[in-house]
Image: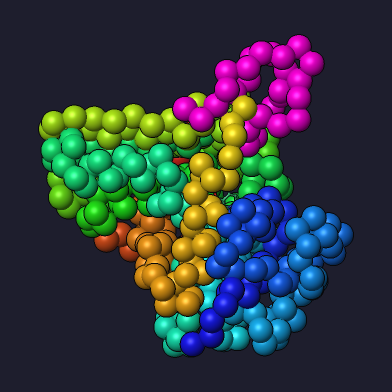
């Protein structure tokens, strides 16, 4: 097995690719980024320059020919995850795939099979498994602080994504639930020791962004787990005021609450504004809540460092393609639930030919539940 730093290539050059590059810069001991691949040459070159990444490609397949690259991270639109994963696996390189895993369950299964066939790791970019504040909550729960946990809630909300493709259901697969609910479902599943998900009840609507997307901009999911606990996952692209991410945990003997951003923020008032407050904050004037060490508090540097250590055989992946597939199955059941206006049991098999999760809601019998504009 090779040693030294794991040599990384990043696919994508914008929002999450920037976070990947910055994360490797924050924790440089286990990995180094050698290349970046993105069809938008200007963006790729700019990102490479900012982080001192030596090689730039406009076609990721060319980057995959670089013999020394060992691990490739995918920070590209959801609709491309499956093909990219299969290509990376065929090139014999380990994969870090951003959430959500794929557009369809069949794609997710093919990705896992491809990684297995080529003997590479398929690691899943769910940083909530590495978020320091949420890890503390889990450590307390696992040590018995709350007795038997009966309810876990996770919520992630903001006023909508930064790039056009998220709003296009053919490239994203769905709206707030697909984009943000994948975090919440993964979180509850992980927090509850990966107990199987028994059923999902989900309600969703498009309240403020009907001019931009056919997808939901707000969703609420209730998940029943086989160990008797309940997960509640709330998501929104309609919530103003920047990113909001929080959890609540309730057990027979106690509870804990964590707000990812507020607890790390400096309550601040400024007439003039300043550089940057927090992800997706619309302004830095007036009252704002700037965070510090934002990426560290999200957990992405720790996540990617862990994945690099897995490539070297020093650790075992804590977030895998299999986790992503469990989440994707629950996402499909959630859209079906919202579409049918009823609780849906898992395992749920979508009807043949469904190309993306949101179709189960868009074509569902209870479509009239969607908010009028
Ligand atoms: N874990 C998280 O919290 C988190 C946060 C944001 C985004 N994401 C995920 O990361 C992925 C990327 O999202 P983003 O916010 O960076 O989007 P973005 O629009 O900011 O960037 C997408 C990038 O993909 C590149 N791209 C498009 N087609 C490509 C192709 N054929 N080959 C190579 N690159 C291509 C674009 O050039 C661009 O650089 C999505 O799956 C998203 O869900 C995860």
Find residue 241 and report its horizontal and vertical position in percent.
Answer: 60, 24
Question: Taking the image as four quarters, which one is ligand 1 found in?
Answer: bottom right
Q: Is residue 203 left or right of residue 76?
A: left
How is the model colour-coded? rainbow
Q: Quadrant of the C terminus?
A: top right
Find residue 37 and report its horizontal and vertical position in percent.
Answer: 74, 69
Residue at left 72%, top 78%? 63
Residue at left 79%, top 70%? 54
| Residue 59 can be seen in this image | yes
Residue at left 51%, top 62%? 305
Find residue 249 and report its horizontal and vertical position in percent.
Answer: 27, 35
Q: Is residue 82 above or below residue 163?
A: below
Residue at left 53%, top 61%? 304
| Foreground pick, 315 / 87 | 315
Q: Is residue 368 left or right of residue 135?
A: right
| Magenta segment | 263-289
Find residue 94 and report its horizontal and vertical position in percent.
Answer: 53, 77
Magenta: main secondary structure: loop
| Foreground pick, 86 / 168 | 86
Residue 274 among magenta residues = yes
Residue 322 among magenta residues = no
């Amino acid at each position: 097995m090779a040693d030294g730093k794991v040599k990384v290539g990043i696919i994508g050059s914008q929002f999450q690719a920037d976070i990947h590059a910055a994360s490797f810069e924050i924790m440089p001991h286990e990995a180094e980024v050698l290349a970046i691949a993105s069809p938008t040459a200007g963006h790729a070159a700019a990102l490479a320059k900012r982080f001192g990444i030596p090689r730039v490609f406009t076609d990721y397949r060319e980057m995959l020919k670089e013999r020394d690259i060992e691990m490739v991270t995918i920070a590209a639109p959801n609709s491309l995850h499956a093909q990219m994963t299969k290509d990376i696996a065929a090139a014999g390189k380990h994969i870090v795939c951003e959430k959500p895993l794929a557009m369809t369950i069949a794609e997710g299964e093919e990705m896992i099979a491809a990684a297995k066939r080529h003997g590479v790791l398929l690691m899943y970019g769910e940083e909530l498994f590495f978020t320091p504040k949420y890890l503390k909550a889990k450590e307390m729960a696992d040590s018995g602080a709350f007795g038997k946990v009966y309810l876990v809630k996770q919520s992630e909300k903001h006023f909508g994504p930064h790039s056009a493709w998220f709003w296009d259901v053919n490239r994203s697969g769905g709206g707030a639930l697909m984009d943000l609910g994948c975090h919440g479902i993964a979180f509850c599943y992980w927090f509850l020791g990966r107990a199987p998900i028994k059923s999902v009840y989900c309600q969703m609507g498009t309240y403020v962004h009907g001019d931009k997307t056919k997808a939901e901009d707000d969703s609420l999911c209730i998940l029943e787990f086989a160990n008797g606990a309940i997960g509640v996952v709330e998501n929104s692209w309609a919530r103003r005021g920047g990113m909001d991410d929080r959890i609540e945990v309730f057990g027979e003997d106690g509870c804990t609450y964590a707000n990812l951003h507020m607890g790390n923020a400096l309550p601040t008032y400024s007439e003039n504004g300043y550089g940057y407050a927090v992800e997706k904050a619309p302004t830095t004037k007036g009252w704002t809540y700037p965070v510090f060490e934002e990426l560290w508090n999200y957990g992405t540097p720790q996540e990617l460092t862990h994945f690099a250590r897995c490539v070297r055989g020093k650790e075992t992946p804590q977030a895998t393609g299999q986790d992503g597939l469990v989440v994707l199955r629950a996402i499909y059941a959630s859209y079906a639930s919202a579409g049918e206006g009823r609780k849906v049991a898992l395992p749920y098999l979508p009807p043949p030919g469904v190309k993306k999760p949101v179709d189960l809601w868009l074509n569902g019998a209870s479509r009239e539940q969607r908010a009028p504009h």
